[in-house]
Image (cartoon, grey):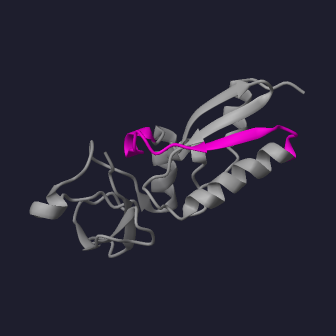
Amino acid sequence: MSYTQEDIWQMLEQVSDPEVPVLSVVDLGVVRKVEIIDNIVEIDITPTYTGCPAMGAIEMGIKFLMIEKGIKCKINLVLSPAWTTDWMSECGKKKLKAYGIAPPQYDGFDDSVLFSTPKGIICPHCNSTNTLLISQFGSTACKSLYKCLDCLEPFDYFKCHK
């Protein structure tokens, strides 16, 4: 059976991020390129940060999907350029918010976390900006832990990476 690049991209929507299962690897932006060369699908993936423990599971998820579809594939781990939250889809950001994780809210790295008071992150539960940074690291290294001072709910914020 013959597949197009578009078919492969659509199939990859079925592979979830193991750390945030509401997101596909396409939503997350870790799938960088799909090529079909001599009936072998080559897929480039980029980790959200170097050493991300989820990359092994993502690679296996992609391989299992391709095997299930009878497709030969090669997966390349590409470290440059480095992943950025700009690569996340708008749909993925909406899925994060609906899941209770505040999506990246600023263009690029928020250096206020190092040099001044962090910017108010919008609470994914009540949309308040009256929030407080509790820890630079949340449930995973790519998220920070916040608390909303209005609804009192804790929540993860998916940090901006540039």
The extreme left residue here reads 116
* Quadrant in the picture for the C terminus: top left
Q: Is residue 140 left or right of residue 112?
A: right
Tag count: 0
x and y, in percent, of residue 30 in the image: 53, 45
* Relative height, residue 125 to residue 154 (above, below): above
**Does the image show residue 149?**
no
* Quadrant in the picture for the N terminus: top right
Q: Residue at x 25, y 70 (%)?
A: 133
**Does the image show residue 78?**
yes
Q: Residue at x 75, y 23 (%)?
A: 4
Q: Residue at x 39, y 45 (%)?
A: 85
Q: Which residues are magenta?
A: 68-87
Examine the structure image and report whether residue 143 is included in the region drawn in magenta. Answer: no
* Relative height, residue 135 to residue 99 (above, below): below
x and y, in percent, of residue 95 in the image: 52, 50
Q: Nearer the viewer, residue 119 or 142?
A: 142
Quadrant for residue 44, please give it.
top right
Q: Is residue 149 left or right of residue 96?
A: left
x and y, in percent, of residue 102 in the image: 39, 58
Q: Nearer the viewer, residue 31 or 13?
A: 31
* Relative height, residue 101 to residue 62 (above, below): below
Quadrant for residue 151, please give it.
bottom left
Q: Is residue 36 left or right of residue 31?
A: right
